[in-house]
Image (tube, rainbow, N blue to C red):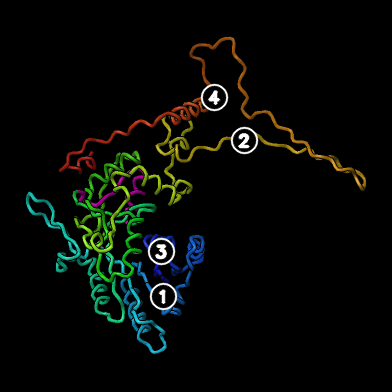
Amino acid sequence: MKVLVLGGTGYVGYGVACAFSRAGHETAATYRNESGSADLAVAEIAPVPWRTWDSCLNSFDVIVDCMDSADTSIMCINRIATCSVSPESGRRNHPVAYIYTSGIWVHGASEPQGKMGLTIVDERNGDMSRVPAWYQEKVNVEALILNKHELMPIIVRPGLVYGQTMGMLNKLFKSAWYGKITCPENYQSRWSTIHLDDLANLYVNIAEAGLCFDACNLSSESAEDVIRALSRASGCNELAFTQEKSLENYALSTSMVTRPSLARSIVGWQPRKMALTDGMELYWMSWILTTGIHRDQAALPIPEQAKAPLCAEPHAHSHLHPAPIPQPQMQINTPSPVPSHPEPTTPQFVQQPPLHPAPPPQPFIQQNAPVHPQLQYQAQQIAVQAAQSQERPPISFPDIPVNDLATLHRQ
């Protein structure tokens, strides 16, 4: 198939485009800046400038919408529908498949049912009348797509996507990196999560199905369990609450428990990645390396060593960005200028003596003698490297009552 991914340089869009390319489909994706074009080309995806995205619509069999803006999606849907029915469209006997990326929050929120826990919803029993106002625009776009007979509508409703740069969870991970986990006030919510790779594989499997699919793992995860796992992986024991009015904060504060029934029964799709809580150690390291935050000196927490070189403890993240080891310098001895047509001379490489030679043995050490600050700092660095070479001890996390996580904030 020939596939076009709208929003192909975004978090979900890039993963979906790569999945179609790996599956052997001829894949193209839109971009808005030159750096995004280079990333797509490296992944063997044809880059399409956003300003000319509609110039060759009728050559594609599947169009995947991974854009965040509802207004932009509506514009694209109307444009594609118009091109599909035009006399010069050149379409074959089947309409173009349009896959729209929505979200499980169109089901509203899972309501508690006494001792039975939260309500479990799927593609067939969600209550659209309880959709929160902050997600209503996604419902409107879904209704528009389903009423467009010129298209073959397919809707994917991902849960809370994790993996690599972590998507909506990026702020949560970044706050742990800076030393204080910032989470919504409703820390007792439950999340329906899905790994980015599993979500991308679902897009490939349903490209010709023409239905609405919820995309999430088979079991939900507690927000409190995720925060505890993130604390253990990052070594951050401080917690703060935020009342920020944002899409991410609303999504993390809403309990949603859903099951991907149709995806399993129709296309045989099943998530294979570890859950967010179970694989937190791997996902934490993947987030650090993918975002490159450990290489950004402006984003690094200021270690105490930089303020006082004789600090007693190394910084919590010093094992991620150790100081470079000084290398011996090489000196090239070149011959002095000589008259014309000199004989070729091979340059000689002379290795300089070590920068830090071992001090000669002392006959005795005077008790209570003052130690030079430089020697004390070198001894401290040796102790830090020795400690890092051993297994990192487990990080103690305060015992937080299940119903009173806010006590940590008050402490």
Q: Amino acid at mark 1?
A: Phe
Q: Amino acid at mark 4?
A: Leu
For mark 4, does the 10 Å Cα neighbourhood hold few (<14), some (14 to 19), or many (20 or more) residues?
A: few
Residue labelled with disc 1: 60
For marks 1 and 2 on the same chain, the one whose residue lies earlier in the sequence: 1
For marks 4 and 1 on the same chain, the one whose residue lies earlier in the sequence: 1
Local SS, label 4: helix
Residue shown at 63%/24% (left/top)? Answer: 357
Q: Amino acid at mark 3?
A: Phe
Residue 199 in the image, given as x and y percentages of width and height: 32, 59
Q: Which stretch is magenta?
A: 168-187
Residue 211 in the image, given as x and y percentages of width and height: 25, 69
Where, by quadrant of the figure, is residue 7 drawn? bottom left
Residue shown at 23%/66% (left/top)? Answer: 134
Cα distance in 3D space between marks 4 and 1 = 68 Å
Local SS, label 2: loop
Cα distance in 3D space between marks 2 and 3 = 46 Å
Cα distance in 3D space between marks 1 and 2 = 55 Å
For marks 3 and 4 on the same chain, the one whose residue lies earlier in the sequence: 3
Residue 175 in the figure: left or right of residue 264: right
Q: Is residue 217 inside the magenta stretch?
A: no
